Every structure is written in C-alpha cells, then in structure tokens.
Amino acid sequence: MEVKVVQFSPHHLEVMDVREIDAALFGFFKTDEAYARIDGLAKVSVQAATFLYDGRVLFVAGFVRLWPGVFEVWMLPSVYIKTAPRSFARLIRRYVDRIGEDFKAHRIQTTSFPDEFHERWMKFLGFSAEGVLQNYTQDKRSMVQYGRVF
C-alpha cells in the first residue's frame, strides 16, 4: 500500500467519502458548517494531514497540543480504509508513535466509540481506556476516553 501524505486542506473534505457511522455520530455532512468545524480543528492542530491512497482520501488526521507534552489526536476516516485495513492500522500506529517521539509527548489522548471493535483498535494503538464520557456527542451518545502514556 502506497500512501501519500499531504498537508490538510478543507478541499479534501469535499472529495472525501466519510463513513456513515462517523457522519451520523459527529454530524459531519457536506455542509459549510461541517467543513468549518473540521477546518477549525485543523487550524489549531500542531499538524493536520490528509492521507491519500490511489488518489482517494483515506483519512484526515491531526493532533492538538493541550499543554507541553500532552496532545489530543483526532482522525476522520473515509470508507476507503476497508481497502487495506492492516496497512491502514500499521500506518496509524506509526503516526501515533511518531507524535510521541517527534514532539516529546508524555501523554496522548483521544476518544472513541464504546464498543468491542474500537476497544481492540485502541489497544492495538497502545491506548488504555480511562473512563466513559457520558452524553458526550451532539446526540448524547457516550464515548470512551483513551490515553497513552510515554
């Protein structure tokens, strides 16, 4: 799998096929408001990147510095992550590892769905569940807070 990494641009959202579960959960639909929300997150990020595979947006990701050594990582995947799931998983793990190394992180955190699949996914990435965030989303769904300590 050959992935090209480019600097994030709001235009990438216009051509991206967001997974239905992410679109519904995060209220991400192809609207100016949705673009502004992700673009705003990207602007406050230390780094925001678009990962392309075969000319398609595979996912967009980035991380925000909360304070020295602590970062919140975010990602919005597309439907194309299913084309090479193992390569995609290794790519994300390297991305998270590099944040820890290159930015001297002593903690990285994120939130994820509260289900068995995402629990295994977070464990694969080196994260540990820290607690449930009740009524966290716009539609009052709960999420799990995950942290990774270096």
Image (tube, helix red, strand yellow):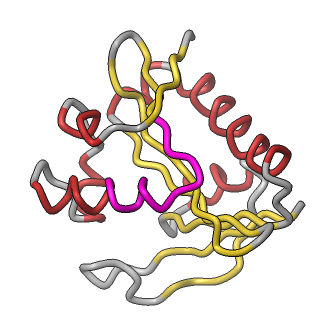
The correct choice, above or below, for 117 with respect to 133 in the image is above
The correct choice, above or below, for 50 with respect to 25 in the image is above
Q: Can residue 137 be spotted in the picture?
A: yes
Percent x, y of residue 16: 25, 33
The correct choice, above or below, for 112 with respect to 75 in the image is below
Which residue is more in the foreground, 108 or 93?
108
Q: Residue at x 64, y 30 (%)?
A: 91
Q: Quadrant of residue 37?
A: bottom left
* Residue 79 shown left or right of residue 30 in the figure: right
* Residue 6 shown left or right of residue 78 in the figure: right
> Magenta residues?
39-49
Residue extending farthest right: 150
Percent x, y of residue 134: 46, 89
The correct choice, above or below, for 106 with respect to 11 in the image is below
Which residue is more in the foreground, 123 or 15?
15
Q: Residue at x 10, y 54 (%)?
A: 31
Q: Residue at x 30, y 53 (%)?
A: 21
Q: Quadrant of the N terminus?
A: top right
Q: Quadrant of the C terminus?
A: bottom right
